[in-house]
Image: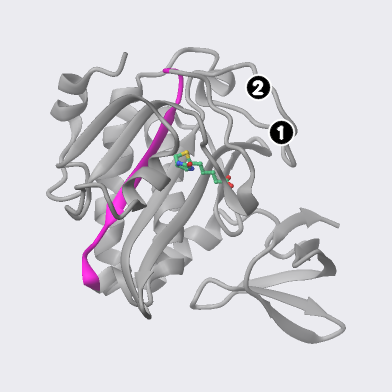
């Protein structure tokens, strides 16, 4: 059971998570908040579910998470200043806030796998999925869905990268309330930077970026490409170097070649 009072005591934000919705079971926190027929429009609303029946990740992959052990939640963004051209930066701010919360509270070293996974000891501890709905060409609502493995230690399913959790790495159970509050506090701080100093976010992200400078393979639209992971550009796209040429990659699954 998630203790709302403990969480509330630790939350220092002004906007993010001030409207907090807790539910035992839902299809998907992302899908629910995005649904036009629901009443939630307040910027920064956080929906936390103890169990998702249709939790999903990138490329429609299933997001597996045991009931009441982890954090599966979505943050709703309706503030227009973030809805125009800040998609990539919000994605980076979200994964960076997960990484910073884990580092600050548990002193675990994290790495960030482009574009939006958080790794500890080469294993995936969290995944992020941004989704939005539009009216004409205007994005109306955006949700940042985060699945963070906290106290689960056994994982079933097929995984590209082996999963892990904070408890697995620390060998002790973790207080989910403190962790979620720290993560949301950090995310709100990073939102300031999304607006005023995006290069700081990119710098901190790159310093944790998995495989940067290494020979990689990347699957983009079923096509495998090879090269050196040269850099990320200012918009967060991956720059792949091959035979002296740089190619900009917009999305894909990165692996060590
Ligand atoms: C990925 O690794 O591909 C992203 C996983 C994102 C999972 C989270 S759990 C909360 C939110 N609701 C969903 O259905 N998905 C995201």
Quarter of the image where one finds residue 215: bottom right
Query: Is 74 included in the stretch rendered in magenta?
Result: yes
Locate the N terminus by quadrant: top left
User: Does dot 1 land on a helix, a strand or a loop?
Assistant: loop
Residue 54 placement (x, y as % from top left): 52, 35
Residue 49 disc label: none
Respond yes or no on whether mark 1 lies under 8 Å from ligand 1: no
Query: Is 257 included in the stretch rendered in magenta?
Result: no
Q: Which residue is mark 2?
A: 155
For disc 1, the neighbor class at 10 Å (few under 14, some 14 to 19, many from 20) is few
Q: Which residues are magenta?
A: 68-80
Quarter of the image where one finds residue 245: bottom right
Q: Is residue 100 visible?
A: no
Query: What sort of colour scheme is used for the picture?
Result: one colour
Question: Which residue is painted at 25% across and 54% down in the image?
Answer: 189
Residue 183 placement (x, y as % from top left): 33, 40
Q: Which residue is mark 1?
A: 162
Left or right for 162, reference 54 = right
Question: Which residue is painted at 38% across and 63% down in the image?
Answer: 133
Left or right for 77, reference 117 = left
Left or right for 188, reference 120 = left
């Amino acid at each position: 059971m998630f203790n709302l009072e403990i969480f509330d005591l630790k939350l220092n934000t002004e906007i993010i998570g001030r409207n907090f919705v807790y539910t035992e079971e839902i299809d998907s926190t992302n899908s629910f908040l995005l649904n036009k027929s629901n009443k939630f429009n307040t910027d920064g609303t956080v929906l936390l579910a103890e169990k998702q029946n249709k939790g999903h990740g990138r490329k429609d992959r299933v997001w597996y998470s045991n009931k009441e052990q982890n954090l599966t939640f979505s943050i709703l963004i309706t503030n227009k200043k973030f809805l125009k051209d800040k998609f990539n930066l919000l994605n980076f701010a979200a994964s960076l806030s997960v990484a910073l919360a884990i580092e600050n509270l548990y002193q675990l070293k994290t790495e960030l796998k482009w574009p939006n996974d958080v790794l500890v000891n080469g294993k995936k501890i969290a995944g992020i999925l941004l989704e939005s709905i539009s009216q004409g060409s205007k994005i109306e609502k955006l949700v940042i869905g985060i699945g963070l493995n906290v106290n689960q230690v056994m994982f079933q399913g097929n995984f590209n990268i082996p999963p892990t959790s904070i408890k697995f790495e620390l060998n002790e159970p973790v207080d989910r309330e403190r962790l979620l509050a720290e993560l949301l506090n950090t995310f709100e701080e990073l939102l300031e930077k999304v607006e005023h100093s995006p290069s700081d976010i990119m710098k901190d992200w790159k310093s944790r970026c998995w495989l940067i400078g290494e020979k990689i393979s990347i699957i983009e639209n079923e096509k495998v490409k090879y090269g050196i992971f040269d850099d990320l550009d200012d918009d967060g796209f991956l720059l792949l170097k091959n035979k002296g040429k740089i190619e900009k990659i917009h999305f894909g699954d990165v692996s060590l070649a």
